[in-house]
Every structure is written in structure tokens, then in C-alpha cells.
Image (cartoon, helix red, strand yellow):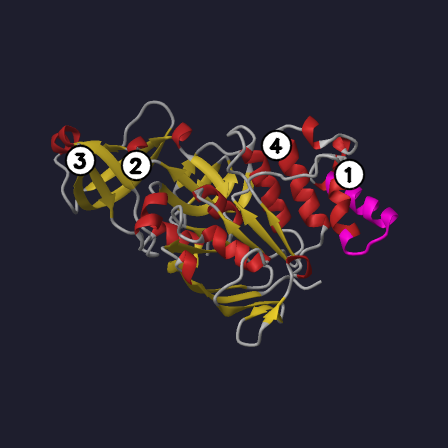
Amino acid sequence: MSAGALSVDVALAARGLELRCEVAAGEVLAVLGPNGAGKSTLLSLVAGLERPDRGRIVLDGAALVDTDAGGWRAPHERRTVLLAQQAMLFPHLTVAANVAFGPRSRGVGRVAAAAAATVWLAAVDTGDLADRRPGELSGGQAQRVAVARALAADPALLLLDEPLAALDVAVAPALRRLLRTVLRTGDRSALLVTHDILDALTLADRVIVLEAGRIVEQGPVREVLSRPRSAFAARIAGVNLVAGTLDGHSLVTPRGERLHGVVDAPAGGAGVALFRPSAVAVHLTPPGGSPRNRLPVTIGEIEPRGELVRVRALDGPDGAAGPVADLTADAAADLDLVPGREVWFVVKATEVTLYPSASPTG
């Protein structure tokens, strides 16, 4: 089966949607935007749950819909699988039967479908739940089973509609790691709708930002979120993001600086460090005391933000946006902060979260 190259060029007047986008074979494209922007509508059009007024949707060279030619493929003929916030398992079937449903629907024999279900349940660490009914599962367990059911169907393209949104904050990180493994194994292609910056950073290669049914910006995830050009991207990216290479429980920046933080598990490879502007303290000299991250920066801009003052460092030599700190006006005045002054941004390791990035740092 091919990896699922997708091309979309559609319009739907009732939803105010008019957009064109592509997903390369083996690529994960995140779709961000405020409520009502058209994110779920895009998934519904690709899945065949809605028809566009005009346009064409092509998956691996086959037209799923072509309004000019009158072509239309029913949802079950599209080789796509939709994984939503709710697991939507069949309540009358066992977990194993739920996962075997996809292969059976494609004409796979009972024995082979059951074998596929066993493989995928083991892959998502739910093999011991095979004989249970959905009503006996926790939310996290049900969503893992839903992932197994989606993959057992052997889709060319996964459609992910905020699959972590309904999960408890204690459960979501484990499923995010599972999805990352799934999406990075076997060159899988996916459209991922999310409100969560971490989903985009850890799962996707590229991102498009929708506002009022139009794409307002797009590009590599880290590039869009570190230098946002739309109101929504700026809002969702209201954190400091530093890219580099993960080294155990720290991240090494391209300039050789080391940021320590909290990570799910020690890891290597491309990664990012996230921390809030309010967690950053500004010092005129390197502070001592308990272990903290210290970044030497040159102040680029100082801007009032209500009761706070935002201190923005100059952009890095690679063009990456400089980190920012939010201080009280009194603190900024006491430090006599002005553009061009060299200071230290300091943030506790406990305020920094480290994550693998979906795409290479270089």
C-alpha cells in the first residue's frame, strides 16, 4: 500500500471554506485554527462525510471527489480512517472484534482478521484487554484500542480529529508518545486537527493555520510557531520555544547552550524546549544558587502588555525568534532595561518541558 499522498482543492460555501493543501506521502500535516475555522470540515470532506460545492480531492492518484467530472467515492471506498476525540467503539463487540472489524470489512478472512487484531492490540499495549467490552475500559484504554482499530484497517491516510482532547492530562502524554511511534513507523500519512501546540510539535512535519475557512499561514511546524504571522498562531504559540538536540534530560542549542528540563523519558535527536515567558527572570549578571538555566541575550524590544512588560531578545543568528520574558513594570524599571543591553534570561529547570520534535532541527 502506498503512503497516502493527498491533494485537496475545495470550496464549501455553507461553511465559508475555500482552501488548497497537500500532504506528501509519509507526511503528517497538522491543521490549527480557532473554533469554526473549518478544521473538522476539512477532515469531513476528505473522509467523504460532506460534499464540496466545487473542487477535487485526490489520494494516491485516485480522485475521491471531482465536481467537474461528477466523480465521487463513498467513505468506505476511500482508504481513509477517522480517529476522533471519542473512541466510538462498537459497544456490543469485544475489543478484539472491534479491531478486527476493519480487516473484515475489506474482505479479510476471520482468522487473518483476528491475527491482525492481535498484532495491533499488542502494538498499543492493550493485548490483555482483548476479551473486554468497551464499557469496561477507561478513556485512555478505549482510545488506545481505537488507534489499533484504525491501523488494522490499513488506511492510506489517517484523519486525526483532536484524538487527545477528551483525555485526562495524566493519560494524554502516554497516548501522544504512542501516536508519535505509530506515525513515525511505516511512512504513515496523516491529517491532524488539534488545538494543542504539543501535538503539532511532537507529531507533525508541517502545519497549516486556518482562519475563517482560509489558510493564513503554513510551513514547517517549528518555523510557523516560532515566527507566527497570524493572530491564532501567535496566540497558540504564547510560549518560548527553543530548538536543538536532546541529550538525556537536557537540550543543546545550535550555539552550544544547554537547557535542562522535564522530559517524559531521556531521549536523543531533534527536540524543543518550551517554557512560559512568565517563568523567565531577568538578571544583569549570571545568578548563582540552585541549578537554573541561564541564557545570555541581547534585548531587542521592550513592549508594554497591560500590567506587564514584555522583554524580547534579539532573534538568533539562524533567524529563530529570540526568547521573551514577562516582567512587572517596576521590575523592568529597577533593572533599567533598554534595547541593546546584554542581560541573562534565567528559568528554573522545572519550568522547562523538553519534547522530541517531529522534524529535524537542521
Cα gap from disc 2 to disc 1, whole angstroms: 47 Å
Could you tell me which residue is drawn at 38 percent across and 60 percent down?
Answer: 214
Residue 207: name its quadrant. bottom left
* Helix, strand or loop under label 3: loop
Whole-percent x, y for residue 185 in the image: 65, 51
- Residue 285 in view (yes/no): no
Whole-percent x, y for residue 156 in the image: 65, 59
Of callouts 4 and 3, which one flags the residue occurring earlier in the amino acid sequence?
4
Q: Is residue 114 magenta?
A: yes
Disc 2 target residue: 277
Of callouts 4 and 2, which one flags the residue occurring earlier in the amino acid sequence?
4
Disc 1 target residue: 96
Which residue is more in the foreground, 247 or 277?
277
Whole-percent x, y for residue 280 in the image: 30, 33
Could you tell me which residue is drawn at 64 percent across and 47 percent down?
Answer: 182
Decide: is 126 above or below 77: above
- Name the amino acid type tagged 2: Pro
Of callouts 2 and 1, which one flags the residue occurring earlier in the amino acid sequence?
1
Disc 4 target residue: 140
* Helix, strand or loop under label 1: helix
- Name the amino acid type tagged 1: Ala
Q: Is residue 33 magenta?
A: no
Residue 306, labelled with which disc? 3
